[in-house]
Image (tube, grey):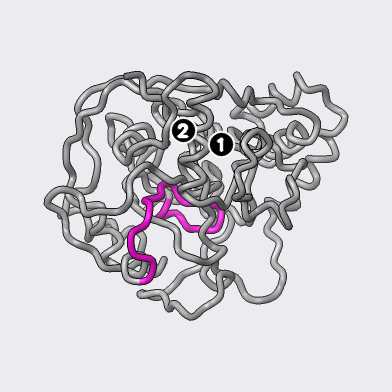
Amino acid sequence: MKTNKAGHWPRFSSPLPKEVTDRFLMGYAPHFVEHPISRQVQGALIDMLALPVSQLLSIISQVEQPLATRIAAGEVLGLICDWFFDHLNPHMLTVPGGTVQIGLAPERVDPVMSAFEGLGLDRSWIEKETPCHRVALDEYRIARYPVTNSEYRHFLLETQHPALASSWAFGAYPHHMANHPVYSVDASDADAYACWLSKRTGRLFALPSEAQWEHAAAGSQRLQFPWGEHFEATFANTAELGLMQTTPVGVFIEGASPFGVMDMAGNVEEYVAQAYHPYPGGPQIRDDLVLDVGEHRVARGGSFTRFRDLARTARRHGRYPRPLYVMGFRLVENLR
């Protein structure tokens, strides 16, 4: 499998043991580790602090800018203004309706297992994606970015909703991460956010269905990753990047999906509208999520704590009760 080998590339045996630390599952020893990308962002921050907002916005939209420079520009923008967001009018992209294919053909399970060998995969995790099947979708709109800390803060202030994001230490709003995706929240909190925004705006916001999410990520080409068939470590904030924290939304320009949707791989896992059930004609999987958690909401896209296998557009995942599971969400707007 073709890869960009910059960053963090541990190898694991299969199956992964359960009784290990989150740090082990991220491929790290107990001692402190700092990857070059962290030092590069720190260095670039100094240069970004003196720049006007207009120039910072320009930097994050230029693919020719180094990734560390784009991240640093986004960090400074998050500090000085709510630069991307009208919390009552999120940036939405239209996805045409039609009959789309989602899932994975059963004969593709072995090639996927082989391509991602060394990540401790259980075969049942990939079988959960089978079979490939057709779904009819009406035209819909999907948020270009996942919901941010800033947007979630507005929701909490207006509603007094009692569930705080676990990433907000002791419930304190992280001002310096206003434009980072919010995490970790429960699926019911994400549903409550969509319901609140619908009532406030008179529009039909919701979490995406699995088919809506996967089609927006993979496009009609049914790409393995939002950008193409091969994983690239600098196209998404996954564990391979080695940053070990969220990044401002929208800085991974090369990682955009065919519809222009950002951050559909890495940063935070994203809840969809449905609980896990086998696809029509698919196998009944009894993995740790099913056995230990029971009914659970499907999540997509992987995160900064997880490796490239979870960044695949067809991968179906969910929240297990440990901090490693970094859960956020994005919205769709159903047009009828």
The earlier-in-sequence mark between 1 and 2 is 1
* Secondary element at tag 2: loop
Write the start and end of the magenta stretch as one range: 292-310
Is there CB contact under 8 Å for labels 1 and 2?
yes
For label 2, the residue is 331
Task: From the top left corner, tell me how far across and down residue 227 is, in percent.
Answer: 42, 36
Query: Residue 296 lies in magenta, yes or no?
Result: yes
Q: Quadrant of residue 290?
A: bottom left
At numbered mark 1, what does the secondary structure look like: helix, strand or loop?
loop
Query: Is residue 182 shown left or right of residue 259?
Result: right
Cα separation between marks 1 and 2: 8 Å
**Label 1, residues with CA under 10 Å away: few <14, some 14-19, many ≥20:** many
The residue furthest right is 50
**Quarter the N terminus occupies:** bottom left
Where does residue 235 sit, x and y in percent of width and height? 52, 41
Query: Which of the 4 image quarters holds residue 180?
Result: top right
Q: Is residue 312 left or right of residue 176?
A: left
Q: Please give the residue where the numbered disc 1 appears in the rendered image.
A: 147
Residue appearing at x 33%, y 45% in the figure: 274
What amino acid is at disc 2?
Leu
Looking at the image, is 39 positioned above or below residue 63? below
Few, some or many C-alpha atoms within 10 Å of disc 2 (few <14, some 14-19, many ≥20)? Answer: many
218 or 93: which is nearer to us? 93
Q: Position of residue 65 (x, y in %)?
A: 66, 31
Question: Which image quarter: residue 174?
Answer: top right
Closer to the camera in the image, 128 or 204 = 204
Task: Tell me the residue at 52%/54% (across/down).
Answer: 5
Any mark on residue 80, and which? none
**Residue that sits furthest to the left in the current view:** 281
Looking at the picture, does residue 115 appear above or below residue 329? below
